[in-house]
Every structure is written in structure tokens, then in C-alpha cells.
Image: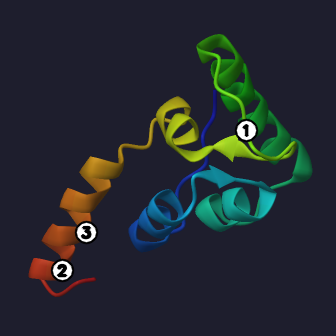
């Protein structure tokens, strides 16, 4: 599955830690400008994993943030390390 690039490490960490569940707006914030079909495809992969794990969302159009990051291969701990290093180098 093709996963678009993140818009920024800061933004990804804000979305991860501020939202138990995310929707279309947060997905577009995370990856930048996406078509509706791309957002739907990304959400469907997460919904499938949520169903397999027996995890349900609070909102009909929302997906679990932790599972979404896992399905999309985004490691929040790795992003934190990278952000910390950028801060140390005064590049963030």
C-alpha cells in the first residue's frame, strides 16, 4: 500500500498525541493535500485492522489513531527521537 509522506514531524506528533481517533481532516493534515479516494483507501485499511482486532470507533467516520499509525508504518517513538535530534541541532 502506498503511504504518502508526512507533512512534518511536529504535525504528526501533535495529531498522534492530541487525538484518540482521527477523521478526514486530521488525515489530510498529516499527509497534506490528498484526494477523497486516497483518504478513503487509507481509512479502509485501518478500519479492516480495527475490525480484526475487535476495536470500535466512537464516531462513524473516525479511526483509531494508534492503529492508523501502526497500519501506515508511522512510528511515533522514532518521530520523537528525530524531533529531539532536530531540536538539539536547532533545526526544528
| Disc 3 target residue | 83
Question: Quick one: SS at disc 2?
Answer: helix
**Quarter of the image with the C terminus in it:** bottom left
> How much space separates mark 1 and mark 3, taking CA atoms?
29 Å
Which residue corresponds to the image point at 46% horizontal and 35% vertical from the top-left? Answer: 73
Residue lying farthest front?
Answer: 58
Which residue corresponds to the image point at 50% horizontal and 41% vertical from the top-left? Answer: 66
Residue lying farthest bottom?
Answer: 90
| Disc 2 target residue | 87
> How much space separates mark 1 and mark 2, taking CA atoms?
35 Å
Q: Report crowding for label 3: few under 14, some 14 to 19, many 20 or more residues within 10 A (C-alpha).
A: some
- In the rendered structure, the answer to whether residue 58 lies left or right of residue 80 reads right
Which residue corresponds to the image point at 84% horizontal and 40% vertical from the top-left? Answer: 40
* Total number of numbered discs in the rendering: 3
- In the rendered structure, the answer to whether residue 80 lies left or right of residue 11 reads left
Question: Quick one: SS at disc 1?
Answer: loop
Label 1 or label 3, whichever lies nearer to me, is 1
| CB atoms of marks 2 and 3 within 8 Å | yes
Label 1 or label 2, whichever lies nearer to me, is 1
Q: Report crowding for label 1: few under 14, some 14 to 19, many 20 or more residues within 10 A (C-alpha).
A: some
Label 1 vs 2, first from the N-terminus: 1
Q: Report crowding for label 2: few under 14, some 14 to 19, many 20 or more residues within 10 A (C-alpha).
A: few
Q: Position of residue 69 (x, y in %)?
A: 50, 41
| Disc 1 target residue | 57
Q: Nearer the viewer, residue 54 or 82?
A: 54
Label 1 vs 3, first from the N-terminus: 1
Amino acid at each position: 500500500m502506498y503511504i504518502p509522506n508526512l507533512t512534518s514531524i511536529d504535525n504528526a506528533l501533535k495529531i498522534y498525541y492530541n487525538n484518540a481517533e482521527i477523521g478526514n481532516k486530521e488525515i489530510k493534515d498529516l499527509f497534506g493535500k490528498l484526494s477523497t479516494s486516497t483518504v478513503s483507501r487509507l481509512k479502509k485499511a485501518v478500519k479492516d485492522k480495527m475490525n480484526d482486532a475487535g476495536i470500535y470507533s466512537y464516531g462513524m467516520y473516525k479511526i483509531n489513531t494508534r492503529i492508523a499509525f501502526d497500519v501506515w508504518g508511522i512510528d511515533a517513538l522514532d518521530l520523537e527521537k528525530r524531533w529531539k535530534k532536530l531540536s538539539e541541532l536547532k533545526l526544528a
